[in-house]
Image (cartoon, helix red, strand yellow):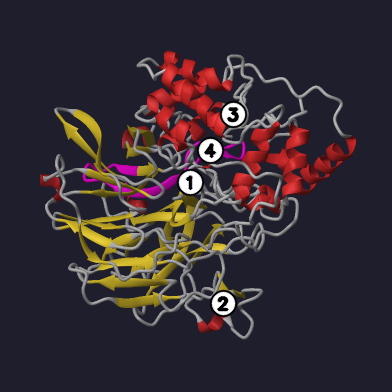
Amino acid sequence: MTLPSVSTRTLLLAGTFAAVIGIAGPVSAQQPPPAAPVAAPAAPLPPGSPMIGRPESEGAMKLAPVAPPVLPVPGDKLDLSKLKLPKGFKIELYAAGVDNARTLRQGDKGTIFVSSRIKDKIHAIVEKDGKRQVKVLYSGLYRPNGIVLHDGTLYIAELSQVSKVDKIEDVLDNPPKPTVIYSDLPKDEAHGWKYLTIGPDNKLYFQVGAPCNICMPSPAHAQIRRINLDGSGMEVVARGIRQIVGMDWNPVTKQLYFTENSRDWLSEDLPNDKLNRLANPGKDNFGFPYCHQGDFADQELGWGHSCDEFTKPIALLGPHVAPLGMRFYTGTTFPEKYKNAIFIARHGSWNRSKKIGGDIVVVNLNPDGTFKSMEPFLTGFIQNNNYVGRPADILFAKDGSMLVSDDYAGAVYRVTYDPRVASD
Amino acid sequence: MRAVFAAAAVCLMALPITAKAQEKLAPCLACHGENGQSAAPEVPSLGAQPKDYLLTQIYLFREKMRKVEVMNEMTKGLTDDDLRAMSEGLAKLPAPAPVSDAGDAARIERAKALVAAHRCNFCHAPTFAGQDQVPRLAAQREDYLLKSLRAYKSAERPGYDPAMASVVEPLRDQDFADLAYYLARQP
C-alpha cells in the first residue's frame, strides 16, 4: 500500500495557529485496504503545532485552539444584543459575509479593505449608489493577514512575501496581480502570518514570529523588520518577540507600539500578553524565549538569564487574551478622554479553561508614553464560556466611526458615539 | 474498498446534483442512507450529526481540504447557501441504530479505558452525540470509525482543528479497532 505523500504546504484553519496538513497524494478510496490491521504510521504533530507541550493533566487535555465556523455567519443570524459599550456608544452590523475578517484599512477614496488569515481573500467594502457592497478583491493569496495603504498603494503581507498594488482604488473592479517586493522570509506556518504597518519614516514594518509556542528561534525569527517601500534596505528593528498581530504609532511620540502574544501551556494565569513600545529601534530585545511578561524567566529556556537583560512591556494585558489589532485614537467624534488612547482588540483566550478577552479595551497613556490605566470598552463576545464573535482589528474610519473586524463570525461592525444619548 | 468506490460512482451517475438545495439531499441519501443509517461499507451514517459538523465537512470537501474524490465531486460548485441548507437538512435525519450484538466484553473494557484516558467524551459529549463542530460517534459504522482514526493518525485526514491529530498521536492500531468496536455499539 502506498501512502499519500504529505505536501509541505500546510493549510491553517483553526485557532491561534492550528496546523493542518494538506494532502498531495492520491485519494485513499481508490487504494486497496491493508490485508490485516497494521499499525498506521505515526505522523508526529506538525512543526509548531499549538498542541505541542500540552501537559497530560485532565484540564489541559480539554483545551485546543478555537476553530471559527467554516463560513461567515449570515447577517440575519448575527445577534449584537449581548454586546456592551460605554454610555452614548452604539454598535451595529456594518458588513456581513466578510469571511475571516482581520486587518482593517481605509483608502483615501473611502474603500474599506479587509484581510483574512486562514482564508485566501482580501475583501473590499464599497458604497455604490447608496448601497454597501462586499466584494472579493483578491483570492488565492496565502495567509494575507497584513495589509496597509500608503499614497494610494495597497501593500499586502502574506506568509512569506510582501507585495504591492498601485492606485488600488482605481482598479477595484479588475485588480492586477500584486507585484512582489520582498520575499526573503521563512515559510513556517506557526506564527507565519504578518501584521503590516507604515512608519512615520515611510517604511513598511512587519514581524517574523517565533515558529512555535516556545522554542529557541533562529536569527531570522522573533523580530520586527522594516523595509523601504520598494522592498529594499531590510533592517531588523526589534528582537525577542514571540508574535505580534497589531502595531500602531503613537501620534505624540511617533514611537511604535505593539501587542505581543505570550507563550501557552505554562499555566492558566501566566504569562500575561503584553503591550510593548519600541523606544530604541535596532537595540530593543523584548525577551522571548528567555523572559515572559518582563518579570519572570522561562522555566526551561530562561535558566542563565535575567529579565533585567530585556526591554520591559509597558502594560500587561491579561493571560492568553490574545491582543491583536490596536489603534491610537486621534479623532474628534469620541469623548475627549479617548484622545491619544489606544484601543486594543483582545481576540480572546483558548489556552485557558475560563475564557477571557474577546473584547476591546482602552489603554490610557501618560504624556511620556508610559502606561496609565486600562478599562473595558466593548464587551460581551463571550457568552457561557463560548465565543459569539472575536474582535480582530480596529479602524477609525474617516466618517468618525470605529469599525471592528470579527474573524470568527466573518463580519465588520460599526461603533458610533452620540453625545445626546450620553447626556440623557 | 474498490467496490465501495464503484458503488459511490454509481450514486454519482444516477443522481446528478440538481439546482435546489432540497433535491441536493437525494444523492447524499443514496449512499449515506435514507434514514440516517448507512448500509455502504466505509460510508458514514449521517443521522443526528450536529449541523455545524456537517457544514464543516462539506465545506472541507468543496474546498478539497478533505480529499475524498466522490465527495469533492459531489460538492463542487455548491454555494455557501447550498452548503448551509444541506447541513441543516441532513442534521434532521434520525440517529442510526447501534450494532445490537452482545459485544466482546474485553474489547469494550479496553475501549472504555481508552475513552477515559483520552477524554474522548469531553468534546464528543458524554453520550458521544457530538456537539457543534465535533461529530457524533455513537452508533457510527465501525469500519468508518476505524478508517477515520487511522486517517487522523497518518495525517491523511487533517481535521478542521488540530485536536484529533494530537489525540491519536500516542494511540496504536489495536486501540483504534477497540474504540471503533465500542462506539459502533453505543446507542
**Span shown in magenta:** A378-403
Residue of label 4: A29
Tell me how far mark 2 sits from mark 1, CA to CA. Answer: 29 Å
Q: Nearer the viewer, mark 2 or mark 3?
A: 3
Front one among A235 and B182: B182
Q: Are marks 2 and 3 in contact (CB under 8 Å)?
A: no
Quarter of the image with the C terminus of chain B is: top right
Q: Are marks 2 and 1 in contact (CB under 8 Å)?
A: no
Viewer can see residue A323:
yes
Residue of label 3: B43
Residue A222: image location, x then y, percent: 44, 71
Residue of label 1: A359
Which label sits on residue A31? Answer: none
**Chain letter of the residue beneath label 4 in the structure image:** A
Q: Position of A221 compared to B169: left or right?
A: left
Residue A79: image location, x then y, percent: 46, 28
Residue A61: image location, x then y, percent: 70, 51
Residue of label 2: A290
